[in-house]
Amino acid sequence: MNNIMVTILTPIYNRSIFILHLYETLIHQQYKKFEWIIVDDGSIDDAGKIIKGIIDKSPFPMKYIKKENGGKHTAINYGIKEANGELVLILDSDDTLPTDSLINITQYYEQCRGLNNCAGVCGLMAHHNGKLIGSRFPKDSMYESTLRYRYKYNVTGDLLEVYKTSVMREFSFPEIENEKFCPESLVWNRIAGKYKLLCFNKIIYYRDYLEGGLTSKIVKIRMNSPVASMMTYSEMLSYDIPFKHKIKAAINYWRFRLCYNGNGSYPKLFGLWNAVAPLGWLMHLKDKRVNKR
């Protein structure tokens, strides 16, 4: 068995009911060289009490950090600074890992560990009933960037990217004043401009979408964090991706640009990309109607 240390990083916000179950699933990981860092993003429930009650008896190293509420991405940034592992796996509080997850992650990572442009590994996600969330990779093992497997090979759905801690520190999440959300794709795409991942067709993460989670209200969340949304879509226009996806990105840029009423700086579009503003405006009107902002 290899000797790679993994940091499991769990940002939480008022999700104390899941902590004990998640702890029990981590105990059953077949690979034992990991630590668990929990960053509490200003919860007002009893999460801290529950976590402190299991830290002393935990068979693996644990650390609990509480900070002021700033959004999941700020909790991730905080946790990355504290991580001791070579790899970081971001595990949401209401999700779990198959018992062989860390074994698969570290074994595949060994294959690209020595490459200068290796950012980590990427495996499949599934619901707890075993049904895949999206598609498989076209090969059982492939070394590609996030942008390439998404836009050249059309791999769809949720995947678990497990990055080197050093890469996550190099590409931290931007923290924008008065915004509490930043799309993970903004950072993953930036990483893809420099690094690749070893991708493999094994399920390494279980996820179900719960009422009240980020996914269930993602449009409204993006409306309330328009600068981060604009950054994500404006940067997509500079990547080597199919033109139709750039058109969609430009429309979405304007969709959320119309949510911004501040006086600060924000990314701007020029030329052709301004022509799709009316389509973004129509989507914006629909969003306002649906979300009753």
Image: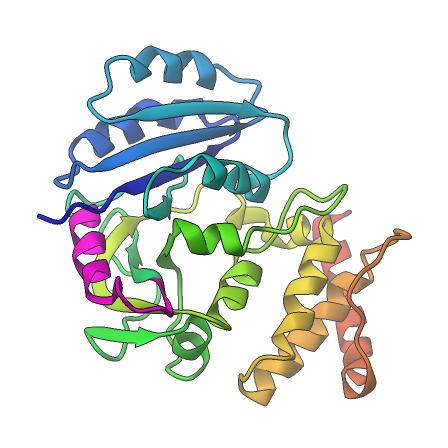
Q: Main secondary structure of the magenta part?
A: helix
In the rendered view, tell whether residue 217 sits above or below residue 9: below
Please report the residue visible at 15 percent of the width from the left and 33 percent of the height from the top.
28
268, 261: nearer the viewer:
268
Q: Quadrant of residue 163?
A: bottom left
Please report the residue visible at 23 percent of the width from the left and 14 percent of the height from the top.
57
In the rendered view, tell whether residue 241 sits above or below residue 46: below
130, 191: nearer the viewer:
191
Q: Quadrant of residue 23?
A: top left
Q: Residue 54, how many percent across, how many down?
A: 30, 15
The way the protein has been coloured in the rendering is rainbow
Q: Which residues are magenta?
A: 101-119
Left or right, 136 with respect to 239, comes to left
- Magenta stretch: residue 112 in it? yes
Q: Is residue 212 visible?
A: no
Please report the residue visible at 24 percent of the width from the left and 53 percent of the height from the top.
204
Q: Residue furthest right?
A: 263
- Magenta stretch: residue 272 in it? no
Q: Quadrant of residue 149?
A: bottom left
Q: Residue 3, how many percent across, how many down?
A: 17, 45
Q: Residue 229, how many percent across, how many down?
A: 68, 59
Label total for image: 0
Q: Residue 18, how many percent across, how many down?
A: 37, 28
In the rendered view, tell whether residue 44 sits above or below residue 143: above
In the rendered view, tell whether residue 197 sits above or below residue 6: below
Q: Is residue 13 visible?
A: yes
Please report the residue visible at 59 percent of the width from the left and 88 percent of the height from the top.
243
